[in-house]
Image (cartoon, rainbow, N blue to C red):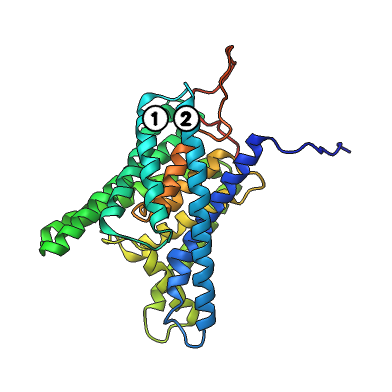
Amino acid sequence: MAPHDDRAPGPEERESLSLALVTGLSVVSSILGRALAPALPGSVAGITGWIKAFDRVSGFLAQLFAIAGILIATRMVTSALRSNAYDLLFKVVAVPVTILVGLLVMMRMRIDYSEPRGSLALALASGALALAATPRLVQSARTRAVGLVLALTGLGGLLHAVGQGLALSANLEALPDRFVAARVFETASFALGVLAAGCAAAWLFGKGSTSWLKLLALVLAATLFSHAAVLGSGPNARLYEVLASRSLGYLLRQPAPYLPGLLSGIIILLQFILAAWLVLARRPSSVRLVLSLCLISAGATDIPLLALALTLAALTARAPLGSEAPTRGPQPSTVSPGALPRATP
């Protein structure tokens, strides 16, 4: 029988646990705040108490995620500035982006908040930081999956911001052609989100037949939910179908991409399921947390708290918690500077 370890967890373990809890908060608050809480009002009579309860819980979790996320992001960007291991481009982008995202999030700590100019600034800033964090990650085979998912999510966020800006100007100036262009950009952003989810799934489930059966089960669950949502928009729908329809409706992108609604719903739900699956581990690695934060924020970085999620993903990937302290002598390392180790899923 192995002896019991009574040692207190070190600073690195505590900080990793904090990041895991914050990532879990981002997933739960996204599900409650973006889908379930707004879907309840008007779905059925006599549930006013439940509606108020879900709204309060959603708001509390969103505020908790905002405060904890800003504190962790500040800690990581400060660590990156003190270290010599990170390139100048990453430092130059990380500081203003973290400040901007932190300020906008503190101004309105709601998961469903969307204000046009601030939303576009959030999407552009967090996407730029994700792209700035990518180059060194893709250089190492051990962190290439993280780098690819970050790059795809960041570029998708930038295209989403362009699409949102075009859609906004099209509505204000009544320009149908510009709205078509907005949908084209949104379709490209959605396609990048699909590739990001595919990379994350390939990293998570590997090549084993059992693992791929798990992935198939997740796809089947997303398909069944999306099918229920389609039925929920018709007559004589059951309550769970109505809730599924309303919840998925709040998750679908605007402007809508040029894809069938059923397929869009399946992919968005699969992203949520994968994000939750990545967090549900006894001690999730930093890689799993980065991938989860990317998936939960894909295509929604115009929402302040999800822009914070992508910012945390980029900072964690390039400036992991418990980062190296300054030392006088050389330290042996098998990992490239700023790279996360490739953990077993």
Rendered view: 91 above or below 184: above
The foreground one among 142 and 71 is 71
Q: CA distance from mark 1 to mark 2?
A: 7 Å
Disc sitting over residue 91 in the figure: 1
Q: Amino acid at mark 1?
A: Lys
Q: Are marks 1 and 2 in contact (CB under 8 Å)?
A: yes
Image check: 18 left or right of 151? right
Image check: 324 left or right of 272? right
For disc 2, the neighbor class at 10 Å (few under 14, some 14 to 19, many from 20) is many
Q: Does dot 2 land on a helix, a strand or a loop? A: helix
**Which residue is located at x 41 percent, y 78 percent?**
232
Rendered view: 313 above or below 216: above
Rendered view: 13 above or below 257: above
Residue at image mark 2: 80
Q: Is residue 194 visible?
A: no
**Which residue is located at x 51 percent, y 54 percent?**
65
